[in-house]
Structure formats: C-alpha cells, structure tokens
Amino acid sequence: MQVEELRDLVVEALDDMKANDIVVLDVRGKTSITDIMIVASGTSDRHVKSIAQTVAFKAKQAGEAPLGSEGLDDGEWVLVDLNGVVLHVMLPKVRDFYHLERLWSMDTPLPLSEHSQDS
C-alpha cells in the first residue's frame, strides 16, 4: 500500500470514530522516522484508546499491520506506528501542552535565546 493510501485509510478511520481536530503533516525530508504524521484528539481516555485501536485494526485488515503502539494503558496519548504513517491520538490538554503540529511544521529553526548562549 502506498503511503498516501495508508494516510487516507487512517484519516477515514479517524473521521468514522469522531476524532477531533485531525491534522496531517507531511514530514518527508524532516525526519527519517516516517513520511506522514497524523495528530488527532479524543474526548476522553477511553475515546483516545478506541480511536487508536480502531485505526490499528483497519490498517491490519488492509494488510498494513502496525509496527507497534504506545500509550494504550493510560489513554492520554497513544502513538500508532504504521511505518509510513505515524498516528498520535491525544487528549486535548496533552495536545495543547506538546504542540506537535507546531514542532513538525516549522520550516526554520527558532533562534536561541540570549539565556542559552555562552556569555
């Protein structure tokens, strides 16, 4: 399966599960970890877990078994690694704290503050 097809499968599953604020980031050229990163929110820890498990199940049905997942015990932030696509499903408060979209969408590095430079 092409990475774009996998991306579309994940987004469709997220939409079916009523995930909130779905953001798709093309991170090719920014990291060798994956090509596409998808970030979405769930309304509760149970919803976050259910979303992640459903996406993993649908990917496996399509012949793309996940390489692994993390965070299913707590359900605040679940990562599903589908190789070409990495999914992050988070509670809104966790998502607001880490700002993954901002981190991975930056095209230029931020300058170091004066406090972190040598005197």
Image (cartoon, rainbow, N blue to C red):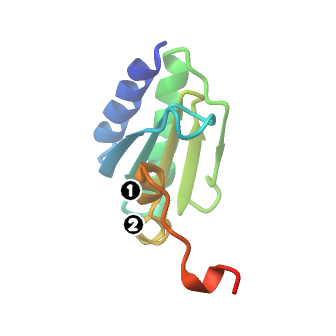
Between 36 and 50, the one lying in front of the other is 36
Whole-percent x, y for residue 87 in the image: 50, 42
Give neighbour class at mark 2: few <14, some 14-19, many 20+ (Cα, 10 Å). some
Whole-percent x, y for residue 117 in the image: 65, 79
At 52% across and 34% down in the image, what residue appears? Answer: 29
Between 99 and 6, the one lying in front of the other is 99
What residue is pinned by disc 1?
41
Whole-percent x, y for residue 14 in the image: 35, 40
The kind of residue tagged 2 is Pro
Between 104 and 113, the one lying in front of the other is 113
Q: Which mark is residue 93?
A: none
Between 50 and 65, the one lying in front of the other is 65
Q: Tell me the distance, in whole angstroms, between the alpha carbons under discs 1 and 2.
A: 6 Å
- Marks 1,2: beta carbons within 8 A: yes
The kind of residue tagged 1 is Ser
Check the image and name the residue furthest to the right: 118
Q: Residue 102 falls in which quadrant of the image?
A: bottom left
Secondary element at tag 1:
strand
Tally of numbered discs: 2
Q: Residue 92 carries which label?
A: 2
Question: Quadrant where the C terminus lies?
Answer: bottom right
Q: Residue 64 falls in which quadrant of the image?
A: top right
Give neighbour class at mark 1: few <14, some 14-19, many 20+ (Cα, 10 Å). many
Whole-percent x, y for residue 15 in the image: 29, 39
Query: Looking at the image, is mark 1 or mark 2 earlier in the sequence?
Result: 1
Secondary element at tag 2:
helix
At 38% across and 56% down in the image, what residue appears? Answer: 41
At 65% across and 57% down in the image, what residue appears? Answer: 73
